[in-house]
Image: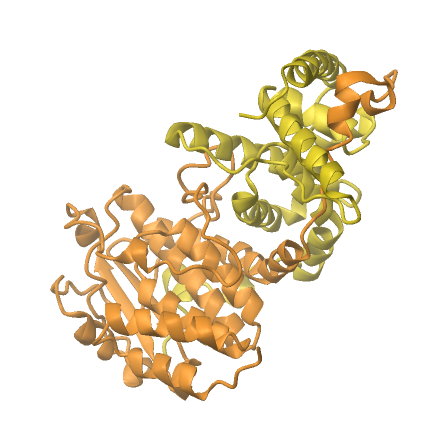
Chain colours: A orange, B yellow
Amino acid sequence: MTEPVRLRETGGAARALLSAGKLSVPHASRQRALAFTSAAASFATAGTAAAAGATSLVKSVVMCVCLGTLGGGVASLAVSETVARWQAPPAGARPGAAALAPQSAGRPRPAAVANPAGELESVPAPSVAPVPSVAPVPSVAPVAQPATLPERQRVGALSGAASASPTLAPAAAAPRAESASSPRVSNLFDEQRVIESARAAVSRGDAPSALATLDYYERSYAHGQFGPEGLALRIQALSAQGDLARARSLAAEFRQRHPHHPLLASVQAAVQSAPSKR
Amino acid sequence: MLEHPLALASGAPASSLARVDEARLRRIVSAQFDALWRFLRRLGVPESDVDDAVQEVILVLARRLDEVRDGSERSFVLSTAFRVASGMRRQVKRRREVHDAPLLERASPGLDPEAAAEQQRLAALLAQVLDQLSLELRAVFVLYELEDFTMAEIASALALPAGTVASRLRRGREAFERLAARALGEGEVP
Protein backbone atom coordinates (compact mmCIF):
# COMPACT_ATOMS: atom_id res chain seq x y z
CA MET A 1 0.00 0.00 0.00
CA THR A 2 1.25 3.47 -0.84
CA GLU A 3 1.29 5.55 2.27
CA PRO A 4 0.09 9.09 1.66
CA VAL A 5 1.92 11.94 3.34
CA ARG A 6 0.26 12.69 6.62
CA LEU A 7 -1.88 15.79 6.58
CA ARG A 8 -0.10 17.43 9.46
CA GLU A 9 3.06 17.33 7.36
CA THR A 10 1.40 19.14 4.50
CA GLY A 11 -0.24 22.40 5.34
CA GLY A 12 -3.47 24.28 5.48
CA ALA A 13 -6.43 23.92 7.74
CA ALA A 14 -6.05 20.19 8.23
CA ARG A 15 -2.55 20.62 9.55
CA ALA A 16 -3.62 23.39 11.90
CA LEU A 17 -6.34 21.24 13.44
CA LEU A 18 -4.33 18.04 13.63
CA SER A 19 -1.52 19.85 15.37
CA ALA A 20 -3.96 20.47 18.22
CA GLY A 21 -4.81 16.81 18.50
CA LYS A 22 -2.25 15.76 21.04
CA LEU A 23 -3.73 13.85 23.93
CA SER A 24 -2.09 13.00 27.21
CA VAL A 25 -3.34 9.93 29.02
CA PRO A 26 -4.31 10.48 32.66
CA HIS A 27 -2.27 8.42 35.07
CA ALA A 28 -5.32 7.85 37.26
CA SER A 29 -7.16 6.20 34.38
CA ARG A 30 -4.29 3.83 33.84
CA GLN A 31 -4.28 2.93 37.51
CA ARG A 32 -8.01 2.27 37.47
CA ALA A 33 -7.67 0.05 34.43
CA LEU A 34 -4.88 -1.98 35.96
CA ALA A 35 -6.82 -2.26 39.19
CA PHE A 36 -9.71 -3.75 37.25
CA THR A 37 -7.73 -6.53 35.59
CA SER A 38 -7.92 -8.79 38.59
CA ALA A 39 -11.69 -8.54 38.74
CA ALA A 40 -11.99 -9.01 34.99
CA ALA A 41 -9.89 -12.15 35.17
CA SER A 42 -12.07 -13.38 37.98
CA PHE A 43 -15.26 -12.75 36.03
CA ALA A 44 -13.88 -14.48 32.99
CA THR A 45 -12.84 -17.49 35.01
CA ALA A 46 -16.14 -17.77 36.82
CA GLY A 47 -18.15 -16.97 33.73
CA THR A 48 -18.09 -20.52 32.49
CA ALA A 49 -19.47 -21.89 35.70
CA ALA A 50 -21.98 -19.12 36.07
CA ALA A 51 -23.30 -19.60 32.57
CA ALA A 52 -23.51 -23.33 33.07
CA GLY A 53 -25.25 -22.89 36.35
CA ALA A 54 -27.74 -20.42 34.99
CA THR A 55 -28.48 -22.72 32.10
CA SER A 56 -28.96 -25.78 34.18
CA LEU A 57 -30.94 -24.37 37.04
CA VAL A 58 -34.35 -25.90 37.13
CA LYS A 59 -36.07 -24.59 40.17
CA SER A 60 -33.87 -22.55 42.34
CA VAL A 61 -31.02 -20.17 42.52
CA VAL A 62 -28.92 -19.98 45.60
CA MET A 63 -26.56 -17.16 46.22
CA CYS A 64 -24.22 -16.44 49.01
CA VAL A 65 -22.33 -13.26 49.36
CA CYS A 66 -19.97 -13.34 52.24
CA LEU A 67 -19.00 -9.96 53.47
CA GLY A 68 -16.54 -11.54 55.81
CA THR A 69 -14.27 -8.60 56.05
CA LEU A 70 -16.80 -6.22 57.42
CA GLY A 71 -16.49 -5.57 61.08
CA GLY A 72 -14.42 -8.65 61.63
CA GLY A 73 -17.44 -10.85 61.46
CA VAL A 74 -18.93 -12.93 58.82
CA ALA A 75 -22.11 -11.67 57.37
CA SER A 76 -23.54 -13.81 54.70
CA LEU A 77 -26.41 -13.09 52.52
CA ALA A 78 -28.17 -15.96 50.95
CA VAL A 79 -30.73 -15.35 48.35
CA SER A 80 -33.08 -17.96 47.16
CA GLU A 81 -35.54 -17.52 44.42
CA THR A 82 -37.81 -19.86 42.67
CA VAL A 83 -38.07 -19.58 38.97
CA ALA A 84 -41.71 -18.80 39.44
CA ARG A 85 -40.74 -15.84 41.55
CA TRP A 86 -38.36 -14.59 38.94
CA GLN A 87 -40.96 -14.97 36.30
CA ALA A 88 -43.62 -13.23 38.30
CA PRO A 89 -44.54 -9.74 37.23
CA PRO A 90 -42.14 -7.39 38.92
CA ALA A 91 -43.50 -5.52 41.84
CA GLY A 92 -41.49 -2.55 40.75
CA ALA A 93 -37.91 -1.64 40.78
CA ARG A 94 -36.17 -1.77 44.08
CA PRO A 95 -36.64 1.63 45.61
CA GLY A 96 -33.55 3.66 45.85
CA ALA A 97 -31.35 1.17 44.09
CA ALA A 98 -30.25 3.55 41.42
CA ALA A 99 -29.92 6.39 43.84
CA LEU A 100 -27.77 4.19 45.98
CA ALA A 101 -24.99 4.21 43.48
CA PRO A 102 -22.44 6.41 45.10
CA GLN A 103 -19.89 8.47 43.34
CA SER A 104 -16.82 6.49 42.65
CA ALA A 105 -13.68 7.30 44.46
CA GLY A 106 -12.16 9.71 42.05
CA ARG A 107 -14.45 10.44 39.19
CA PRO A 108 -18.02 11.24 38.28
CA ARG A 109 -20.39 8.40 37.74
CA PRO A 110 -20.63 7.26 34.18
CA ALA A 111 -23.69 8.02 32.19
CA ALA A 112 -23.30 6.18 28.96
CA VAL A 113 -22.58 2.52 29.53
CA ALA A 114 -25.48 0.30 30.28
CA ASN A 115 -25.76 -3.27 31.33
CA PRO A 116 -23.35 -5.14 29.16
CA ALA A 117 -25.86 -7.90 28.75
CA GLY A 118 -28.19 -5.52 27.05
CA GLU A 119 -27.25 -2.29 25.46
CA LEU A 120 -23.87 -2.97 24.01
CA GLU A 121 -25.11 -5.35 21.40
CA SER A 122 -21.86 -5.58 19.56
CA VAL A 123 -19.87 -6.44 22.63
CA PRO A 124 -20.20 -9.85 24.17
CA ALA A 125 -21.76 -9.75 27.58
CA PRO A 126 -19.74 -11.04 30.49
CA SER A 127 -21.58 -14.29 30.79
CA VAL A 128 -23.10 -15.09 27.50
CA ALA A 129 -20.62 -17.64 26.34
CA PRO A 130 -22.50 -20.75 25.36
CA VAL A 131 -21.43 -23.52 27.63
CA PRO A 132 -22.46 -27.13 27.57
CA SER A 133 -24.89 -27.74 30.33
CA VAL A 134 -23.51 -29.32 33.43
CA ALA A 135 -25.75 -31.66 35.31
CA PRO A 136 -27.60 -29.54 37.80
CA VAL A 137 -27.03 -30.75 41.30
CA PRO A 138 -28.28 -28.05 43.55
CA SER A 139 -27.46 -29.17 47.03
CA VAL A 140 -30.17 -27.02 48.42
CA ALA A 141 -33.71 -27.98 47.74
CA PRO A 142 -35.79 -25.27 46.24
CA VAL A 143 -37.94 -23.67 48.81
CA ALA A 144 -40.52 -21.12 48.00
CA GLN A 145 -40.31 -18.29 50.44
CA PRO A 146 -42.53 -15.39 51.14
CA ALA A 147 -41.50 -12.62 48.89
CA THR A 148 -41.85 -9.79 51.29
CA LEU A 149 -39.85 -10.49 54.40
CA PRO A 150 -38.31 -7.33 55.69
CA GLU A 151 -34.70 -6.64 54.94
CA ARG A 152 -33.63 -7.17 58.55
CA GLN A 153 -35.10 -10.63 58.56
CA ARG A 154 -33.84 -11.46 55.11
CA VAL A 155 -30.27 -10.67 55.80
CA GLY A 156 -30.23 -11.02 59.52
CA ALA A 157 -31.10 -14.65 59.32
CA LEU A 158 -27.84 -15.16 57.56
CA SER A 159 -25.63 -12.85 59.46
CA GLY A 160 -22.90 -14.56 61.32
CA ALA A 161 -24.38 -17.99 61.68
CA ALA A 162 -25.47 -18.13 58.11
CA SER A 163 -22.45 -20.05 57.03
CA ALA A 164 -23.55 -22.95 59.11
CA SER A 165 -26.68 -23.58 57.22
CA PRO A 166 -27.75 -23.19 53.68
CA THR A 167 -31.23 -22.30 54.75
CA LEU A 168 -32.84 -20.31 52.10
CA ALA A 169 -33.89 -16.80 52.74
CA PRO A 170 -36.18 -14.74 50.62
CA ALA A 171 -34.61 -12.65 47.99
CA ALA A 172 -34.33 -8.96 47.86
CA ALA A 173 -37.51 -7.03 47.78
CA ALA A 174 -38.23 -7.05 44.10
CA PRO A 175 -36.68 -8.54 41.04
CA ARG A 176 -35.25 -6.32 38.40
CA ALA A 177 -38.05 -4.84 36.45
CA GLU A 178 -36.39 -4.32 33.14
CA SER A 179 -35.26 -7.69 31.91
CA ALA A 180 -36.74 -10.98 30.96
CA SER A 181 -36.91 -13.86 33.39
CA SER A 182 -34.06 -15.93 32.04
CA PRO A 183 -31.60 -13.05 31.92
CA ARG A 184 -32.64 -12.27 35.48
CA VAL A 185 -31.36 -15.60 36.69
CA SER A 186 -28.19 -15.11 34.74
CA ASN A 187 -27.86 -11.55 35.95
CA LEU A 188 -28.17 -12.62 39.55
CA PHE A 189 -25.24 -14.94 39.07
CA ASP A 190 -23.34 -12.18 37.37
CA GLU A 191 -24.16 -9.75 40.14
CA GLN A 192 -23.08 -12.16 42.81
CA ARG A 193 -19.86 -12.78 40.96
CA VAL A 194 -19.03 -9.10 40.77
CA ILE A 195 -19.83 -8.50 44.41
CA GLU A 196 -17.81 -11.51 45.42
CA SER A 197 -14.89 -10.22 43.41
CA ALA A 198 -15.10 -6.86 45.15
CA ARG A 199 -15.29 -8.59 48.51
CA ALA A 200 -12.21 -10.63 47.70
CA ALA A 201 -10.34 -7.49 46.73
CA VAL A 202 -11.27 -5.84 50.01
CA SER A 203 -10.18 -8.95 51.88
CA ARG A 204 -6.75 -8.92 50.34
CA GLY A 205 -6.37 -5.21 50.94
CA ASP A 206 -6.63 -4.23 47.29
CA ALA A 207 -8.88 -1.20 47.62
CA PRO A 208 -8.32 0.16 44.09
CA SER A 209 -9.40 -3.13 42.59
CA ALA A 210 -12.42 -3.28 44.88
CA LEU A 211 -13.46 0.23 43.91
CA ALA A 212 -12.99 -0.43 40.20
CA THR A 213 -15.09 -3.56 40.54
CA LEU A 214 -17.81 -1.74 42.43
CA ASP A 215 -17.83 0.97 39.77
CA TYR A 216 -18.48 -1.75 37.26
CA TYR A 217 -21.22 -3.24 39.42
CA GLU A 218 -23.04 0.03 39.80
CA ARG A 219 -22.81 0.80 36.15
CA SER A 220 -23.97 -2.62 35.05
CA TYR A 221 -26.67 -3.28 37.62
CA ALA A 222 -28.34 0.01 38.35
CA HIS A 223 -31.20 -1.84 39.99
CA GLY A 224 -29.05 -4.62 41.36
CA GLN A 225 -29.99 -6.92 44.18
CA PHE A 226 -26.83 -6.28 46.15
CA GLY A 227 -26.90 -2.52 46.43
CA PRO A 228 -26.42 -2.33 50.19
CA GLU A 229 -23.71 -4.96 50.13
CA GLY A 230 -21.89 -3.12 47.38
CA LEU A 231 -22.16 0.13 49.23
CA ALA A 232 -20.85 -1.49 52.41
CA LEU A 233 -17.88 -2.86 50.52
CA ARG A 234 -17.19 0.52 48.97
CA ILE A 235 -17.21 2.13 52.39
CA GLN A 236 -14.72 -0.37 53.64
CA ALA A 237 -12.49 -0.01 50.60
CA LEU A 238 -12.48 3.76 50.95
CA SER A 239 -11.69 3.44 54.64
CA ALA A 240 -8.89 1.03 53.89
CA GLN A 241 -7.24 3.42 51.49
CA GLY A 242 -7.62 6.30 53.91
CA ASP A 243 -10.39 8.22 52.22
CA LEU A 244 -12.29 8.57 55.44
CA ALA A 245 -14.23 11.66 54.46
CA ARG A 246 -15.81 9.88 51.54
CA ALA A 247 -16.27 6.69 53.53
CA ARG A 248 -18.05 8.55 56.31
CA SER A 249 -20.25 10.37 53.89
CA LEU A 250 -21.30 7.09 52.32
CA ALA A 251 -21.71 5.52 55.73
CA ALA A 252 -24.13 8.28 56.64
CA GLU A 253 -25.96 7.59 53.41
CA PHE A 254 -26.02 3.91 54.23
CA ARG A 255 -27.46 4.63 57.67
CA GLN A 256 -30.11 6.85 56.20
CA ARG A 257 -31.17 4.43 53.50
CA HIS A 258 -30.80 1.21 55.45
CA PRO A 259 -31.35 2.09 59.11
CA HIS A 260 -32.10 -1.52 60.04
CA HIS A 261 -29.66 -3.28 57.81
CA PRO A 262 -27.55 -5.87 59.64
CA LEU A 263 -24.43 -4.52 57.98
CA LEU A 264 -24.97 -1.08 59.44
CA ALA A 265 -22.97 -1.80 62.58
CA SER A 266 -20.08 -3.14 60.54
CA VAL A 267 -20.21 -0.15 58.25
CA GLN A 268 -20.04 2.22 61.16
CA ALA A 269 -17.23 0.29 62.73
CA ALA A 270 -15.27 0.45 59.48
CA VAL A 271 -15.35 4.22 59.35
CA GLN A 272 -14.70 4.67 63.06
CA SER A 273 -11.69 2.42 63.30
CA ALA A 274 -9.88 3.27 60.09
CA PRO A 275 -6.92 5.62 60.40
CA SER A 276 -6.94 8.49 57.98
CA LYS A 277 -4.16 8.30 55.45
CA ARG A 278 -4.95 11.49 53.63
CA MET B 1 -19.80 -24.03 55.52
CA LEU B 2 -21.61 -23.26 52.35
CA GLU B 3 -20.13 -24.32 49.12
CA HIS B 4 -19.44 -21.67 46.60
CA PRO B 5 -22.76 -20.94 44.96
CA LEU B 6 -21.35 -21.37 41.50
CA ALA B 7 -20.17 -24.82 42.41
CA LEU B 8 -23.59 -25.58 43.79
CA ALA B 9 -25.21 -24.59 40.59
CA SER B 10 -22.85 -26.19 38.18
CA GLY B 11 -21.99 -29.31 40.06
CA ALA B 12 -18.36 -28.66 39.32
CA PRO B 13 -15.85 -27.16 41.66
CA ALA B 14 -14.63 -23.77 40.62
CA SER B 15 -11.08 -24.96 40.85
CA SER B 16 -11.59 -27.22 37.86
CA LEU B 17 -12.20 -24.27 35.60
CA ALA B 18 -9.59 -22.90 33.29
CA ARG B 19 -8.04 -19.91 34.97
CA VAL B 20 -7.62 -16.71 33.09
CA ASP B 21 -3.98 -15.76 32.89
CA GLU B 22 -4.25 -12.65 35.00
CA ALA B 23 -0.60 -11.79 34.67
CA ARG B 24 -0.83 -11.79 30.89
CA LEU B 25 -4.04 -9.81 31.01
CA ARG B 26 -2.35 -7.20 33.14
CA ARG B 27 0.67 -7.07 30.89
CA ILE B 28 -1.49 -6.48 27.83
CA VAL B 29 -3.56 -3.81 29.54
CA SER B 30 -0.44 -2.07 30.74
CA ALA B 31 1.23 -2.19 27.35
CA GLN B 32 -1.79 -1.19 25.31
CA PHE B 33 -3.45 1.20 27.71
CA ASP B 34 -2.23 4.48 26.25
CA ALA B 35 -3.19 3.52 22.71
CA LEU B 36 -6.52 2.19 23.92
CA TRP B 37 -7.37 5.30 25.93
CA ARG B 38 -6.41 7.68 23.16
CA PHE B 39 -8.24 5.65 20.53
CA LEU B 40 -11.45 5.66 22.56
CA ARG B 41 -11.19 9.40 23.06
CA ARG B 42 -10.42 10.02 19.43
CA LEU B 43 -13.45 7.96 18.48
CA GLY B 44 -15.53 10.42 20.45
CA VAL B 45 -16.02 8.62 23.76
CA PRO B 46 -16.43 11.44 26.29
CA GLU B 47 -13.81 11.74 28.95
CA SER B 48 -16.44 11.05 31.60
CA ASP B 49 -17.14 7.66 30.03
CA VAL B 50 -13.77 6.58 28.80
CA ASP B 51 -12.80 4.67 31.95
CA ASP B 52 -15.99 2.68 31.66
CA ALA B 53 -15.31 1.94 28.03
CA VAL B 54 -11.84 0.78 29.01
CA GLN B 55 -13.39 -1.59 31.53
CA GLU B 56 -15.65 -3.03 28.86
CA VAL B 57 -12.66 -3.65 26.64
CA ILE B 58 -10.79 -5.32 29.48
CA LEU B 59 -13.74 -7.59 30.19
CA VAL B 60 -13.88 -8.74 26.59
CA LEU B 61 -10.13 -9.20 26.54
CA ALA B 62 -10.25 -11.28 29.72
CA ARG B 63 -12.98 -13.52 28.40
CA ARG B 64 -11.25 -14.13 25.12
CA LEU B 65 -7.67 -14.02 26.26
CA ASP B 66 -6.96 -17.52 25.02
CA GLU B 67 -7.87 -16.45 21.51
CA VAL B 68 -5.43 -13.55 21.49
CA ARG B 69 -2.20 -14.62 19.89
CA ASP B 70 1.13 -13.18 20.89
CA GLY B 71 1.75 -10.17 18.71
CA SER B 72 -1.89 -9.50 17.99
CA GLU B 73 -2.74 -7.96 21.34
CA ARG B 74 -2.95 -4.42 20.06
CA SER B 75 -5.15 -5.49 17.20
CA PHE B 76 -7.53 -7.25 19.53
CA VAL B 77 -7.67 -4.37 21.96
CA LEU B 78 -8.26 -1.70 19.34
CA SER B 79 -10.82 -3.65 17.36
CA THR B 80 -12.68 -4.33 20.60
CA ALA B 81 -12.43 -0.65 21.49
CA PHE B 82 -13.97 0.22 18.15
CA ARG B 83 -16.98 -1.99 18.88
CA VAL B 84 -17.34 -0.62 22.39
CA ALA B 85 -17.17 2.96 21.12
CA SER B 86 -19.69 2.09 18.45
CA GLY B 87 -22.08 0.72 21.06
CA MET B 88 -21.64 3.75 23.25
CA ARG B 89 -22.25 6.07 20.36
CA ARG B 90 -25.55 4.35 19.63
CA GLN B 91 -26.54 4.73 23.26
CA VAL B 92 -25.68 8.38 23.29
CA LYS B 93 -27.70 8.92 20.16
CA ARG B 94 -30.64 7.10 21.67
CA ARG B 95 -30.49 9.17 24.78
CA ARG B 96 -29.96 12.34 22.76
CA GLU B 97 -27.59 13.60 25.35
CA VAL B 98 -24.80 16.00 24.79
CA HIS B 99 -21.52 15.08 26.36
CA ASP B 100 -18.46 17.02 27.11
CA ALA B 101 -16.44 18.55 24.35
CA PRO B 102 -14.31 15.59 23.38
CA LEU B 103 -10.64 15.94 22.71
CA LEU B 104 -10.45 19.19 24.59
CA GLU B 105 -6.93 18.72 25.68
CA ARG B 106 -5.55 20.71 28.52
CA ALA B 107 -3.31 23.43 27.28
CA SER B 108 0.30 22.42 27.13
CA PRO B 109 2.30 23.64 30.08
CA GLY B 110 4.56 26.51 29.24
CA LEU B 111 2.26 28.08 26.71
CA ASP B 112 1.37 31.71 27.21
CA PRO B 113 -2.32 32.32 27.79
CA GLU B 114 -2.97 33.48 24.27
CA ALA B 115 -1.31 30.46 22.70
CA ALA B 116 -3.08 28.17 25.16
CA ALA B 117 -6.42 29.67 24.24
CA GLU B 118 -5.67 29.19 20.57
CA GLN B 119 -4.70 25.58 21.19
CA GLN B 120 -7.96 25.01 22.99
CA ARG B 121 -9.89 26.60 20.17
CA LEU B 122 -8.22 24.39 17.59
CA ALA B 123 -8.76 21.31 19.73
CA ALA B 124 -12.44 22.11 19.95
CA LEU B 125 -12.62 22.58 16.20
CA LEU B 126 -10.81 19.30 15.69
CA ALA B 127 -13.38 17.55 17.86
CA GLN B 128 -16.17 19.15 15.87
CA VAL B 129 -14.73 18.05 12.59
CA LEU B 130 -14.03 14.50 13.72
CA ASP B 131 -17.57 14.24 15.03
CA GLN B 132 -18.82 14.79 11.52
CA LEU B 133 -17.01 11.73 10.19
CA SER B 134 -18.65 8.35 10.38
CA LEU B 135 -17.10 6.10 13.00
CA GLU B 136 -15.67 3.85 10.30
CA LEU B 137 -13.87 6.70 8.55
CA ARG B 138 -12.93 8.28 11.84
CA ALA B 139 -11.25 5.16 13.18
CA VAL B 140 -9.02 4.76 10.17
CA PHE B 141 -8.33 8.47 9.95
CA VAL B 142 -7.26 8.98 13.54
CA LEU B 143 -5.08 5.90 13.60
CA TYR B 144 -3.27 7.09 10.51
CA GLU B 145 -3.14 10.80 11.04
CA LEU B 146 -2.88 11.08 14.80
CA GLU B 147 -1.47 7.77 15.98
CA ASP B 148 0.95 7.30 13.10
CA PHE B 149 -0.16 3.78 12.29
CA THR B 150 0.74 2.51 8.86
CA MET B 151 -2.08 1.40 6.66
CA ALA B 152 -1.01 -2.20 7.10
CA GLU B 153 -1.10 -1.76 10.85
CA ILE B 154 -4.58 -0.30 10.63
CA ALA B 155 -5.74 -3.21 8.52
CA SER B 156 -4.41 -5.55 11.17
CA ALA B 157 -5.69 -3.55 14.13
CA LEU B 158 -9.22 -3.20 12.83
CA ALA B 159 -9.31 -6.54 11.02
CA LEU B 160 -10.07 -4.87 7.71
CA PRO B 161 -8.94 -5.69 4.19
CA ALA B 162 -6.16 -3.47 2.92
CA GLY B 163 -8.35 -2.08 0.19
CA THR B 164 -10.99 -1.07 2.69
CA VAL B 165 -8.42 0.76 4.77
CA ALA B 166 -7.12 2.60 1.72
CA SER B 167 -10.61 3.55 0.66
CA ARG B 168 -11.68 4.73 4.08
CA LEU B 169 -8.49 6.67 4.59
CA ARG B 170 -8.88 8.42 1.27
CA ARG B 171 -12.49 9.32 1.95
CA GLY B 172 -11.71 10.30 5.52
CA ARG B 173 -8.90 12.58 4.48
CA GLU B 174 -10.98 14.23 1.80
CA ALA B 175 -13.82 14.83 4.19
CA PHE B 176 -11.51 16.04 6.92
CA GLU B 177 -9.73 18.52 4.68
CA ARG B 178 -13.02 19.90 3.44
CA LEU B 179 -14.50 20.15 6.91
CA ALA B 180 -11.33 21.57 8.42
CA ALA B 181 -11.17 24.32 5.84
CA ARG B 182 -14.77 25.16 6.48
CA ALA B 183 -14.28 25.09 10.25
CA LEU B 184 -11.31 27.40 10.18
CA GLY B 185 -12.95 29.61 7.63
CA GLU B 186 -16.14 29.86 9.57
CA GLY B 187 -14.36 29.89 12.80
CA GLU B 188 -16.26 29.59 15.96
CA VAL B 189 -17.02 26.70 18.23
CA PRO B 190 -20.73 26.80 19.07
Identify the image quadrant of the N terminus of chain B. bottom left
Picture residue at 17% right of the left edge, 51% below the top: A84
Q: Position of residue B73 (x, y in %)?
A: 73, 43
Q: Does B175 appear above or below B148? A: above
- The answer to whether residue A66 is seen in the rendering is no
Relative horizontal placement of residue A233, taking residue B175 as reference (left or right): left
Q: Position of residue A93 (x, y in %)?
A: 22, 50
- The answer to whether residue A249 is seen in the rendering is yes
Using the image as rendered, state which of residue B56 and residue B51 is in the foreground.
B51
Task: Please give the count of numbered marks on the rendered protein.
Answer: 0
Relative horizontal placement of residue A27, taking residue A205 as reference (left or right): right
Using the image as rendered, state which of residue A109 and residue B73 is in the foreground.
A109
Picture residue at 30% right of the left edge, 49% below the top: A184
Q: Does A179 appear above or below A51? A: above
Q: Does B104 appear above or below A271? A: above
Q: Position of residue A132 (x, y in %)?
A: 46, 47
Q: Position of residue A66 (x, y in %)?
A: 39, 75
Picture residue at 42% right of the left edge, 51% below the top: A219
Relative horizontal placement of residue A213, taking residue A162 as reference (left or right): right
